[in-house]
Amino acid sequence: MHLFAENLAIEIAQYYRNLALAHGAIPKIFTLVNGEGDQYLFFIDDLMLDPKEVPEFLSYIVHEHESVCYAQGTLVILDKTQQLIEFAVIDEEAAQAIVCSAELTRDLEDRPVGLTEFDKILAPKKTIFFGGLFTEQTLSEDKRQEFEELWIEMKPKILHRTMGI
């Protein structure tokens, strides 16, 4: 497994911890890292795409930026006060993904009151719903152009930094 994938798991856990406890918001996120350590992070809901197009777009971005790993995370609601923050880190060359989960507790007024540590396990990459984004898809030239324009439009909202090794 690439060192960037392991670092990404640690960073995304901290990112979600800060968002949950400081703001009470847990957005669906997507982040990727390329071989040079450039990291891009954005909210999936900002894409404004038909849900069927989201995996195509994410795969397009993974290939355009020559990613070595990526992660996707979301909130899973069990009931009004018990929720899970879950994410998985997918490494291009590893057969296993890093899957992380923490329990978020809210009070009856929907304020976050606690977040457990993120449990980390390895799971077969093929069992992760979004684990196949490294598989290149054939896109029409119109679709490629649409995705390229969307990426350019999104860039001002995207967190872009260089990950240290």
Image: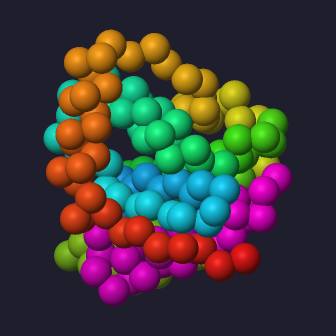
Picture residue at 31% right of the left edge, 26% below the top: 144
**Percent position of residue 39, x then y:** 51, 64
Picture residue at 18% right of the left edge, 51% below the top: 153
Left or right, 17 with respect to 48, comes to right
Picture residue at 60% right of the left edge, 55% below the top: 34
**82 up-or-down from 65: above or below:** below
Left or right, 94 with respect to 35, comes to right
Q: How is the image coloured?
A: rainbow
**Percent position of residue 157, x then y:** 24, 64
Left or right, 13 with respect to 44, comes to right
In this view, the residue in front, 4 or 145, is 145
Q: Is residue 69 visible?
A: no
Can you tell which quarter of the image residue 10 is in? Answer: bottom right
Is-magenta flag for residue 155? no
**Percent position of residue 21, x then y:** 39, 83
Q: Is residue 48 visible?
A: yes
In this view, the residue in front, 139 or 22, is 139
Q: Which residues are magenta?
A: 1-25
Picture residue at 20% right of the left edge, 76% below the top: 109
**Percent position of residue 63, x then y:** 52, 37
Most distant residue in the bottom direction: 22
**145 up-or-down from 109: above or below:** above
The quarter in which the C terminus is drawn is bottom right
> Which secondary structure class fits the magenta region best?
helix
**133 up-or-down from 117: above or below:** above
Query: Count of labels shown?
Result: 0
Left or right, 125 with respect to 142, comes to right
Is-magenta flag for residue 16? yes
